[in-house]
Amino acid sequence: MPNPATTPVNPVLLPSPALFDVTNIAAKGVEGAIERIALDRLELAPNARRDISQEGIERLAAMLMRTGQLVPCIGHRAAPAAPVVLYDGQRRLLAAKASHRLAGGEGFEGLEPVQSLIVLLLDHEPNADEIRRIQAQANQRESLSLVDQQDQLRDCWDARAGLREPDRIAAVCADLGISPKRAHNLRRQLALPEQIRTRVAERPAGEQISVTMANRLADMHEIAPQLTEAVAKRITSTDLHDKALQDLGRS
């Protein structure tokens, strides 16, 4: 096994330099300032993310209108009178603009449209390498694991106890920024025994269980819990998962 102390470091992998250094607590202050910028003074830099869900933009718009903006965008203003170019914040800007169409409409009653975004303004115009790094890190924000999403929904569902069922579902979806279908699937998964629930995966492999299979097992569990556990125990490979799904589809 190579000794890390003697393994040569590839200079390509070293910061050159880091845009915001977070390895040295004694470093100088952040190289930029935070400002609130009106939407009509914001422009988008070219971005690698082109496949954008309109449904996701509308959910984000609702979250911005209800809870505000929690994470600043990153941008630069070339001159005092120039617009701010955003390098990180594409979806937030699209959602903010969409809020003007959605506010007050069905599902967005009582909400006011977003008028500005909070932006961390860099003290220099980033070069092409820095822009790639900014956008790559923004696009690396990982979603919660499915098990963590289930637990998050359960906590939020419990916190909204006392509301009528339709209002409770609407509130949970608004809190978490998810669709009613997503919330419904997560609730069905929570009805499963723990040893089955933790095997559910978006893209199942090996002994994992798909969301579709989890929904079928949740329906079965309400009627025959022992049969549900027996079926789940038989799924030990992707082939057996697919075979079990076909069999349940015929029943």
Image: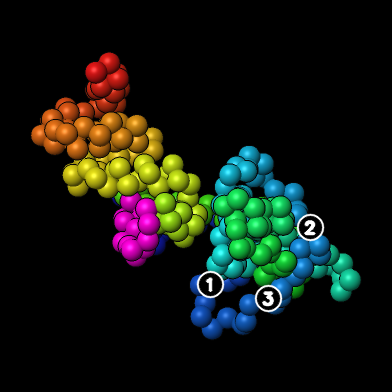
- Give the residue number, with chain letter if any, for mark 3: 34
Vertical placement of residue 104 versus 226, above or below: below
Nearest the viewer among 19 and 56 is: 56
Tell me the SS state at disc 2.
strand
Residue 7, image quadrant: bottom left
State which mark lies toward you, 1 or 2: 2
Relative to 167, 123 lies left or right: right
158 relative to 95 in the view: left or right: left
Tag 3, which secondary structure? Answer: strand
In the rendered picture of this protein, how many numbered marks are placed on residues? 3
Numbered tag placed on residue 43 in the rendering: 2
The crowding category of the residue bearing disc 1, from other C-alpha atoms within 10 Å (few below 14, some 14 to 19, many at least 20), is few
> Quarter holding the C terminus?
top left
**Residue under the point 65% across and 57% down:** 104
Is there any visible trace of residue 54 in the rendered image? Answer: yes
Residue type highlighted by circle 1: Val
Alpha carbon distance from label 3 to label 1: 18 Å
What is the magenta range? 150-165
Q: Quadrant of residue 156?
A: bottom left
Which residue is the extreme one toward the right? 81
Q: Which residue sits at x=62%, y=81%?
A: 29
